Image: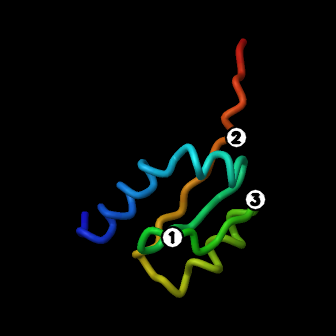
């Protein structure tokens, strides 16, 4: 993994609760420690992240709602 990607993965981990509060049930794209796109539609996020190439990380943010069977 490239160092830049590792930094973004670390950033995602460190900001997971904040992201869960702000973007529940959405896909986000992250580049250099900032959210560059967010939407419930993966295609929209992908299209916005495409100019950043392989350096953008796309992740689904779960709502955090507890689901019990």
Point 32% across, 63% down: residue: 7
The residue tagged 3 is 40
Q: Farthest residue toward the top?
A: 69
Q: Which mark is residue 18?
A: none
* Residue farthest along the bottom direction in this orientation: 51
Badge 2 crowding class, 10 Å Cα cut-off, few under 14, some 14 to 19, many 20 or more, is: some
**Distance between mark 1 and mark 2 Cα atoms:** 20 Å
**Mark before the other along the chain sequence, 1 or 2:** 1
Q: In the figure, is residue 27 to the left or right of 6?
A: right
- Which of the two marks, 2 or 3, is nearer to us in this view? 2
In which quadrant will I find the C terminus? top right
Which residue is painted at 24% across and 69% down in the image?
2
Residue 56, percent across and down?
47, 72
Residue 18, placed above or below residue 30: above
Residue density around tag 1, few if under 14, some if 14–19, many if 20 or more, within 10 Å: few
Locate residue 44: give its quadrant. Answer: bottom right
Q: Is residue 15 left or right of residue 66?
A: left
Q: Residue 47: x and y, percent?
A: 65, 79
Q: Earlier in the sequence, mark 1 or mark 3?
A: 1
Q: In which quarter of the image is residue 8?
A: bottom left
Q: Nearer the viewer, mark 1 or mark 3?
A: 1
Q: How far apart are marks 1 and 3 (CA)?
A: 18 Å
User: Image height check: is 35 above or below 65?
Assistant: below
Q: Name the residue under label 1.
A: 34
**Quadrant (top left, top right, bottom left, bottom right) of the N terminus:** bottom left
**Quick one: SS at disc 2?**
loop
Kindly report the distance in space between the C-alpha atoms of the residues bearing marks 2 and 3: 12 Å
Q: Nearer the viewer, residue 1 or 4?
A: 4
> Which residue does the numbered mark 2 point to in the structure image?
63
In the displayed structure image, the side of residue 25 where residue 57 appears, left or right: left
């Amino acid at each position: 993994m490239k160092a830049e990607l590792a930094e973004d993965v670390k950033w995602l981990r460190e900001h997971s609760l904040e992201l869960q509060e702000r973007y529940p049930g959405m896909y986000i794209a992250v580049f250099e420690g900032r959210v560059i796109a967010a939407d419930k539609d993966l295609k929209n996020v992908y299209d916005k992240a495409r100019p950043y190439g392989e350096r953008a990380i796309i992740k689904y943010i779960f709502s955090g709602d507890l689901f019990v069977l």
